[in-house]
């Protein structure tokens, strides 16, 4: 059936959502309204650790325009959580869940005020009288893991350590005995705020069928539905989740924010209820990227062969688990980089504290883990007097090489190809020679840095990855119209466009014939999360399966011909507890970047002049969209490396606005970003595709820090490298 006239894989067709988004007709959750709609405001804890002794809502209830005030006693099943239900929907007395009367971070939700106007809700929110008994606060995970530290979840056991992964590969002392050169590093990695342009918002109502409909921006309709239904004590069918347009997500929308409380209010009041968070509410109200404290000790031979790696990672999980187990699982798998190391020992801890919960954020722990690996590699290259690209090629994973988890990644492994592609396009050798001619005392100094990355596709670790699609073929003699049903979330990355392209290609029809129905739990199977760089891979395979089935039925003259298919990805296994041995993932993608920076040695200001990013996406379904992912990831990672200084003190957020938490603007973006699309097909991917959502984010920070070292001779062990931080480091080298 495939008609070569309609080949559309590999073509940069315009996005299917482009016109609505450019003209402003696309409706985001904050744009929604309904007749008779009420407005909600949330009273947050605003303190890091305390028991709520008493809540008095009478003054708030009496405020003109207030319709209802809800507290913990009104939540049927007062708990939720994506991985583990360790968080109360509302904290306070009157709930039958043990520990639900305690607030554990400033963004815990305590009460909901629903009123005729937003102003009334906001004013009444302040009139809720809460009596707190403060509890001891612990905010450093290194302190929190010590015996005797204040417990964040005493009801869950006698330790704050919520995750501990171990790697024991080979024999670490034997490995160090073989080493001629040691590289030791201590690193401190920061929080990062997702800073999506659209803060949390939503509308909930009860429809004609008596079902609670929640319209909200998320990453996985079906788990939102599940968590809402659980907390409300309702069967799944009583809850319908619909996503309007979504203004960015990056992992920050995987965990609940306004979903459950909106549903609760709409259900209790039987009226539409709307909420829109302010930027401050968004910043204190959702999770952040995991900060980490790291100690690493790596050994290599004189010839530059890695022989041993020993690493300890202590990650701040914050007040609740969110996806800390998943994030640290990924970090554990990739923490030795895309290199073969025979002897590896690692201990990776996630520890509860009274800080904001930490969660998924583009790369799922891989950015942090690869920062460790790539810093170690850059420092090793310096110690050996070896070119950093050459050192990486020497150790790059080849077919048959094992990762830290003791098994080989699925073939084909393309890390050497992307390293070569990035170095070649950058002109690495030539630029190195040119920059060695810089006048030694220049104030503005240039430097270059190189780093690699790789990223799993999908969740895995033994979880059976799955994705559903349905395709309807309408027409008589020929296919006139195709309807694709798929719940996968379009968070701005272009996934819906790619789905339409893949459906058109699989069916041999022009893309104009394909209509996508999406973003809904009603009448649709589970697509899985838009995260872990998985949607192109998973949706593509699901769409191919559904298309094949629909075409068979079309041939058998069924009209409409309907194919429904759930793709199951290859099986994986979880970590063996004592060694980490596992086959954790069914696919990976590989990346490398070369970066040039200019450092003002008088002010500590760093400017990224040029980035060359080589990413093996297997098959670019839509090359323009791949470029978009690469450029977006690089600017977001630039924020991580240089600008975004999220400060928490004693459990309080000091940078709770975008005026104090600086993200890159167009004026900060690197002057030049060049995308090199490498295509080594993954035989299990649809048309060979791997995944690209997180990949280009990974190498940037360590490449920038290596370039800063190249320019100044200074290794930064903590970032973001703000001008102040770098200036101080430069001063220290001048006045030792
Ligand atoms: Mo993302 S961290 O895969 O939502």
Image (tube, helix red, strand yellow):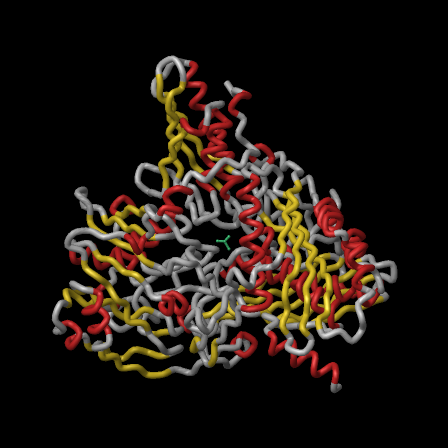
Residue 502 vertical position relative to residue 130 in the rendered view, above or below: above
Instruction: Locate residue 241, reporting x and y percent.
Output: 31, 47
Instruction: Locate residue 656, reporting x and y percent.
Output: 42, 72
Locate residue 361 relative to residue 559 in the image: left or right.
right
Query: Residue shown at 46%/23% (left/top)?
Result: 509
Q: Which residue reaches farthest bottom? A: 735
Q: Which residue reaches farthest right? A: 302
Residue 413 vertical position relative to residue 389 in the rendered view, above or below: above
Residue nearer the viewer, 574 or 316? 316
Query: Residue shown at 72%/58% (left/top)?
Result: 450
Locate residue 242 relative to residue 397 in the image: left or right.
left
Image quarter hosting the C terminus: bottom right
Instruction: Locate residue 203, reporting x and y percent.
Output: 26, 54
Q: Is residue 672 visible?
A: yes
Locate residue 166 relative to residue 116 in the image: left or right.
right
Residue 46 vertical position relative to residue 674 in the rendered view, above or below: below
Looking at the rendering, which quadrant does residue 607 occupy? bottom right
Residue 294 vertical position relative to residue 622 in the rendered view, above or below: below
Instruction: Locate residue 254, reporting x and y percent.
Output: 43, 55
Query: Residue shown at 69%/46% (left/top)?
Result: 408
Q: Is residue 244 visible?
A: no
Residue nearer the viewer, 731 or 37? 731
Residue nearer the viewer, 731 or 592? 731
Query: Residue shown at 61%/71% (left/top)?
Result: 721
Looking at the rendering, which quadrant does residue 355 occupy? bottom left
Locate residue 207 relative to residue 104 in the image: left or right.
left
């Amino acid at each position: 059936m495939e008609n070569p006239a309609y080949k559309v894989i590999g073509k940069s067709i315009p996005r299917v959502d482009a016109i609505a988004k450019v003209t402003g007709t696309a409706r985001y959750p904050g744009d929604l309204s309904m007749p008779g709609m009420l407005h909600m405001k949330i009273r947050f804890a605003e303190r890091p650790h305390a028991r709520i002794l008493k809540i008095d809502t009478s003054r708030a209830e009496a405020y003109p325009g207030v319709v209802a005030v809800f507290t913990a006693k009104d939540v049927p099943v007062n708990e939720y959580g994506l991985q583990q239900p360790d968080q109360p929907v509302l904290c306070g007395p009157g709930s039958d869940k043990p520990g639900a009367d305690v607030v554990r971070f400033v963004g815990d939700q305590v009460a909901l005020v629903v009123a005729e106007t937003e102003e009334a809700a906001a004013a009444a929110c302040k009139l809720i009288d809460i009596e707190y008994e403060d509890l001891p606060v612990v905010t450093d995970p290194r302190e929190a893991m010590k015996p005797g530290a204040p417990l964040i979840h005493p009801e869950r056991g006698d330790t704050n350590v919520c995750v501990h992964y171990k790697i024991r590969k080979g024999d670490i002392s034997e490995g160090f005995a073989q080493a001629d050169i040691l590289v030791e590093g201590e690193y401190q990695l920061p929080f990062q705020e997702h800073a999506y342009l659209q803060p949390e918002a939503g509308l909930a109502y009860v429809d004609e069928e008596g079902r609670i409909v929640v319209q909200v921006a998320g990453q996985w309709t079906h788990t939102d539905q599940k968590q809402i239904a659980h907390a409300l004590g309702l069967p799944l069918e009583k809850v319908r989740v619909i996503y309007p347009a979504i203004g960015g997500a990056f992992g920050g929308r995987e965990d609940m924010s306004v979903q459950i409380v909106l549903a609760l209010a709409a259900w209790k009041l039987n009226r539409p209820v709307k909420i829109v968070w302010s930027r401050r509410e968004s910043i204190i109200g959702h999770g952040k990227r995991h900060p980490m404290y790291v100690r690493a000790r790596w050994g290599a031979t004189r010839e530059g062969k890695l022989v041993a790696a020993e690493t300890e990672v202590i990650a701040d999980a914050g007040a609740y688990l969110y996806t800390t187990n998943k994030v640290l699982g990924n970090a554990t798998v990739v923490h030795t980089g895309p290199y073969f190391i025979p002897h590896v020992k690692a201990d990776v801890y996630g520890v509860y504290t009274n800080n904001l919960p930490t969660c998924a954020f583009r790369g799922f722990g891989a950015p942090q883990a690869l920062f460790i690996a790539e810093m170690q590699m850059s420092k090793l290259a310096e110690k050996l007097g070896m070119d950093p690209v050459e050192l990486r090629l020497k150790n790059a994973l080849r077919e048959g090489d094992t990762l830290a988890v003791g098994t080989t990644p699925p073939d084909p492994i393309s890390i050497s190809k992307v390293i070569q592609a990035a170095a070649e396009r950058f002109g690495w050798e030539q630029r190195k020679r040119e920059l060695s001619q810089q006048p030694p005392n220049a104030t503005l100094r240039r430097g270059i840095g190189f780093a690699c990355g790789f990223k799993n596709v999908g969740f895995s670790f033994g979880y059976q990855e799955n994705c559903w699609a349905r395709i309807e073929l309408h027409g008589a003699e020929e296919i006139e119209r195709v309807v694709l049903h798929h719940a996968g979330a379009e968070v701005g990355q272009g996934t819906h466009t790619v789905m339409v392209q893949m459906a058109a290609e699989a069916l041999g029809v022009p893309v104009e014939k394909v209509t996508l129905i999406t973003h809904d739990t009603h009448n649709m199977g589970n697509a899985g999360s838009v995260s872990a760089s998985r949607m192109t891979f998973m949706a593509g395979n699901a769409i191919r399966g559904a298309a094949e089935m629909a075409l068979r039925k079309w041939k058998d003259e069924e009209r409409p011909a309907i194919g429904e298919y759930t793709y199951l990805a290859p099986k994986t296994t979880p970590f063996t507890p004592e060694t980490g041995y596992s086959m954790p993932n069914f696919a990976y993608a590989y990346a490398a970047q070369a970066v040039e920076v200019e450092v003002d040695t008088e002010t500590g200001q760093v400017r990224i002049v040029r980035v060359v990013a080589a990413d093996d996406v297997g098959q670019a379904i839509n090359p323009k969209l791949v470029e978009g992912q690469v450029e977006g990831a690089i600017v977001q990672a630039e924020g991580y490396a240089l600008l975004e200084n999220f400060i928490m003190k004693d459990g309080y957020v000091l940078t709770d606005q975008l005026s104090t938490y600086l993200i890159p603007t167009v004026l900060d973006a690197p002057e030049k970003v060049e995308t090199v699309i490498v295509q080594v097909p993954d035989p299990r991917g649809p048309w060979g595709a791997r995944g690209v959502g997180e990949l280009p984010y990974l190498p940037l920070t360590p490449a920038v820090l290596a370039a800063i070292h190249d320019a100044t001779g200074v290794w930064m062990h903590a970032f973001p490298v703000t001008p102040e931080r770098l200036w101080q480091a430069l001063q220290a080298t001048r006045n030792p």
